[in-house]
Amino acid sequence: MSPPQANQPLPPGHQLENYRIERQLSMGGFSIVYLAYDEEDTPVAIKEYLPNSLALRSAGDVLPTISEEHRATFRHGMKCFFEEGRALAHLSHPNVVRVLNFFRANETVYMVMQYERGRTLQEHIQKHRGEIKETFIRNVFVRLLNGLREVHTHKLLHLDIKPANIYLRIDGNPVLLDFGAARQALGGEGPNLKPMYTPGYAAPEQYKAPDQLGPWTDIYAVGASMYACLGGTVPQPAIDRLEKDRFEPAAKKWAGKYSPQLLETIDWCLDLDHHERPLSVFALQKALTERQPAVNESTWIDTLGQRLRGLIKK
Amino acid sequence: MKFTIYQESRVGKRRNNQDRLAHCYSRDALLMVVADGMGGHLHGEVAAQIAVQYLTEAFQREAKPRLTDPFMFLAGSLQNAHRAVQDYALAKRLPEAESPRTTCVACIVQDSVAYWAHAGDSRLYTLREGRVLTKTRDHSTVQSMIDEGHLTAAEAVNHPLRNRIYSCLGGVQNPQLDFSRKTTLQAGDVIALMSDGVWGPLADQQIVAALHGRDVRQAVPRLLDEAERMGGPNCDNLSLVAMAWGENYGEEVTTSVETQSLPFDGHSTQMPEFDHRSLPLPELSDDDIERAIDEIRNAIKKHSK
């Protein structure tokens, strides 16, 4: 009779193992994230595995109701949650969210992560649409790429990089969040868990050639995230670009507002052909730290070089 | 007919919710409708209520279980709903300035074909394969300005006239109703009807990303969360009904409406719950879970100094 309910979060003040729940931070289809405090009153973010369609917690309850016929699916979905935990547990880097603990309670599983004050790059873009400075973009992404390098060094791919998954600490230092998609890099999850993509940020190979995923796939998403910083718009989704490419190169759209070198770098990341993108995070970092050349001979030679590359592609 | 449908309406940051929405189906036909009321006091709310109620009642009368002509049904019932709102204004002797008015977008699906019509700036989107297949054109001043090349879509977002519409139900003028083409649906297509409180703060891409290929029962509340967040401190009322056609989704999305189970002349505005298909899954035992957790905890210990 009534529409399916949304899951109820654990109430403020609830004692979950060694943590005291403060409030809900966000709720997705698969999990709820809480702000909580540990025994030393250090704030942490706790992610609770609770897929809406399989487990229901009603108001006032702590244990979710999982019907017998959903039990297997519910447990199967837990695997993704473990993959995320596994991926993060192996990483210890200031620009990658830290997982602090992992435990089982209330018939489900919980991942405790470091919590810091700040906001997502998405929120920052929304607040400062069209006014984001070149130095901000270079600074944030060069540091974020330090974290991404660490991810790639561990033979992991993030696969869902986007401004909403990039958190800016109060000091401006970025942290890469949400490794919920990272499991795909590990393969073999079977057909039941559909890969997730965020249109505009997902690279073409994520739709068309999942066997060709690589560091270049994350690089495409980094390019799209930088592109989003320029004017608050997302590039045309790759799947549509494959059909009819209406992508407006940053170098054209934002000419005069940002240095050509930055804009060309962003467009470079967004090449549909992954062979044409920066081959590694390191190569991209190098391009982003390159000092913006003053208008001199080398500039137009660079530009000419890039134009030639553009022509050769066609 | 087989589909998954979910609807939700929120007040946003306004004092009251002048939006109304409904869906209703017989064995062979489905109606979805969203109305966004305007007018002083609570009259907008009443106008939206009258429109939605009029359409659902007409549907229940005529869809037994099929509509003879869906376009004729939409034309007739929207026109009559317009008069019903006018009658209300007359009965209450409301001055023209306060006259209750409402936008309205309504959609019929029958034989896997969708038909829709609208007046005002409540929109209908059809989504296919991760893209916007069609989108209604607002009867709004800014949309005309965009069409005439006086304004870009980006400039329209915060334009002072963005809420001015030139077609609605109620009011002195006859509504201008725009009708869709007959659109044959494919499995996986999504039809979404929404008030401007939803599409206003969002880019089309966000709407596609949120609704396409996802379970509408979770996607709808999430998209509303997003619109509400982006809508900020003056967030308008938000109403959204989204319907995913057919099946062949991932296993998470198996609760759908099967209209074959309805009696021949029955109707339902409810959503019967169906069981999740039980697919043979490798069982994850308690031991497996404990092992995975131990492994993760050890990795955490090893990698943190």
Image: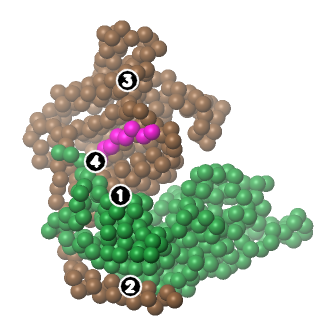
Chain colours: A green, B brown
In the picture, the quarter occupied by the N terminus of chain A is top left
- Please, which residue is most extreme toward the right here? A296
The answer to whether A14 appears left or right of B197 in the picture is: left
Can you say whether B221 is above or below B63 in the image?
A: below
Can you say whether B252 is above or below A19 in the image?
A: above
Chain letter for mark 3, please: B
The residue singled out by tag 2 in the image is B296
Q: Which residues are magenta?
A: B5-13
Q: CA distance from mark 4 to mark 2?
A: 39 Å
Chain letter for mark 1, please: B
Q: Main secondary structure of the magenta part?
A: strand
Q: Earlier in the sequence, mark 2 or mark 3?
A: 3
The residue singled out by tag 3 in the image is B42
Look at label 3 and name its amino acid: Leu
The residue singled out by tag 1 in the image is B214
Question: Mark 2 and mark 3, same subunit?
Answer: yes
Across and down, in percent, residue A244 comes to 56, 56
Q: Residue at x 31, y 15 (%)?
A: B88
Q: CA distance from mark 3 to mark 1?
A: 36 Å
